[in-house]
Image (cartoon, rainbow, N blue to C red):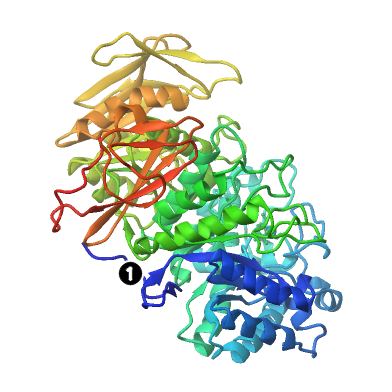
Amino acid sequence: MTSAPTSRFPYAKGSDGSRRLGYGADYNPEQWPREVWEEDVRLMGEAGVNIVSLAIFSWARIQPASDTWDFGWLDEVMDLLHAGGIGVDLATATASPPPWLTTAHPEILPVTATGETLWPGARQHWRPTSPVFREHALRLVRKLATRYADHPALVAWHVNNELGCHNVYDYSDDAADAFRVWLRSRYTTLDALNHAWGTAFWSQRYSEWGQILPPRLAASHPNPTQQLDFKRFSSDALKDHLLAERELLGELTPGVPVTTNFMVMSGIKGMDYADWAGAVDFVANDHYVVPGPRDRDELSFSANLTSGIAGHRPWFLMEHSTSAVNWQPVNVAKQPGELARDSLLHVAHGADAVCFFQWRQSAAGAEKYHSAMVPHAGADSDLFRAVVDLGGTLEALAPVAGTEREPARVAVLFDWGSWWASEHDSHPTSRLDYHREALDWYSALLRLGVRADVVPALHTDFSAYDVVIAPVLHMVSQTAAKDLARYAENGGHLVTTYFSGVVDENDHIWLGGYPGALRELLGIRIEEFGPLLDGDTVGLDLELPGAGAHATGSLWTDRIDVVGQDVAVLARYRTGAYAGRPAVTRRSTGGGSASYVSTRLGIEGLAGLLPELLAPAEVTSELPEEARGSVELAVRRDAHHRYLFLVNRGETPVNLPGTTGEVLAGPAAAGGLVLPPREVVVLRQPAPGSAGADQGRPLG
Ligand code: GAL
């Protein structure tokens, strides 16, 4: 076992030189008079803050006119922070172009699919493909990097901010030009493009590259492959901006790591972060909870997926909220304990820094009702006291810094291509929600107390997992189909669902019966899909040991014929158009298996079915029975220790009998642990096989 590679992560160091978990926020001193800055640094010290992201929206302040630069205030803030022992993740400040620039160059403003200009007045009003914007942005980056290259506070670069948050899809003429360049490099010839886009359909054949446009508002459904390629292109165009800034920073300050904040969270779909991971020196993520019955499942899922994107190396939580946000229809405050619990859940899934938006709550502007580390009420507040407490907890968790996540035995695959393609218009149903489907499986695993990794399909070696769950793996290339078949033949257990294996990477149907690319592996054939109307359901009989179990399906059904050898029917439709036919199947493939679930079972139904799907791999929960569902377990480790994070997700205390280990954070475990609501305990146990491994006992 080796430690995770962490050489480019901007760790703060303790007085003995050992690593500390990062703690801090976005810091926007330009919103405050000079006298507040000193008070800020003093309070940061009180809270244990050791890193801030600075100058994210400071372009207009740094460069008030094309040839005027004002760095005095920033020099002073950098010096003050350094004197306070606080490192700076310095933004390149390119996120929000200043009014003088958009006035002189309105051609940098993005354009919607319906041809409307997105005017200045908010933020991120720039076209990712505008050569004019790029030139001005890089000029600013050069100035900043040259000025602060040797400043002792500088520990990392923060490129732009949340690239694509508001400007991922731009349909301007710049975008059209860049799209054509991108397409030429993907297809080389127009013939290849015409084939990939299926332009024989609806008289769409192109005879010149110049005829091709982004999928602007059209009379009916735009060409699906054009839509798909535009999504790929738009993600690449933003990545290209990231790379352009990064390249310049690399030249000017080669020793300083570069990152940008991803947005791995529900509702953000446009950027293929699995593909972006190689463009940063360490992965950083922003996450905001949308309150609701599954909010902490979603938090755990997103943190877990961020770790997967980061190749299970430590990652940086760049933003989350201390309490309410300002951009939801109703912005609910966090309950006592939630601030720490949410933060520690990210650490449990590999975050080595915990930061917030923002340090001091704004008095003016669009985000004045968004919580911060120092609220409007000031430092004499329960919120600031909770912030100080969390600083103490993170200090106590210093031994966790630099450790890796211990891989789970089960993986849930997440695939941007399938996400984008499966939700296109003109499909069997418009009700399919790829993210919700993946989250359902994850929630069901949480309910059973089974630890799982959420991993991007791209670049993941899933042969390391005993069970791979691939919900709605809609787009499957020939290579991917072979990899999955090899996985199952070599003893892996694959589980997939309806609308999987249906199209190739060009969004062309695999012919001969669904699920096309996976038909042989699964040993089934489907002639026709049976999507269900809203509110319609089908009954299922589960043909499992100790039978009599029922489940209910919604959204989708399939008319399945079993065509392969060694296919067991695990459930049949009891009602609906396909009553009596198979609904869930499993084909044995030597040591492994390939299972297919043809309807949407929801969390409850999946939790009922999963034990059977996990049984061939002998995967069960590591948690004591009474804790399953209410407690989440995540494990980090190094060569000597395992660090168990036990998170009470619920509102009642949970018993963890026989759980032992050295308590690094959370309630002490005298004679068996009782975990109060919303609390987290972190236990250190010797790693199996290490000296002292007989002390501390695994769970379950
Ligand atoms: C993020 C953004 C921050 C702030 C925050 C509010 O999207 O990066 O600048 O706006 O949301 O939740």
Does the Cβ of the disc 1 residue fall within 8 Å of ligand 1? no
Q: Confirm whether residue 272 shows in the render.
A: no
Q: Is residue 233 visible?
A: yes
Location of residue 188 in the rendering, given as x and y in whole percent from the top left corner: 50, 67
**Residue drawn at x 60%, y 69% as measured from the top left:** 44
Q: Amino acid at mark 1?
A: Pro
The residue nearer to you, when weighing 625 against 579, is: 625
Q: In this image, 420 relative to 615: left or right?
A: right
The percent coordinates of residue 567 (x first, y second) are: 23, 24
Q: Residues within 10 Å of mark 1 (few under 14, many from 20)?
A: some
In the rendered image, the vertical position of residue 452 relative to residue 602, given as above or below: below
Residue 510 lies in what quarter of the image?
top left
Which residue occupies the extreme right position in the image? 103
- x and y percent of residue 605 in the render? 42, 22
Side of 127 relative to 564 (left or right): right
* Mark 1 residue element: loop
Q: Quadrant of residue 487?
A: top left
Q: Is residue 282 above or below residue 38?
A: above
**Which corner quadrant holds the N terminus?**
bottom left
The residue singled out by tag 1 in the image is: 5
Residue 258 vs 475, above or below: the answer is below
Point 38% across, 27% down: residue = 597
The answer to which of 682 and 455 lies nearer the viewer is 682
> Which quadrant of the figure shows ligand 1?
bottom right
Image coordinates for residue 653, horizontal then vertical, percent: 44, 31
Location of the C terminus by quadrant is top left
The residue at 62%/58% (across/down) is 206
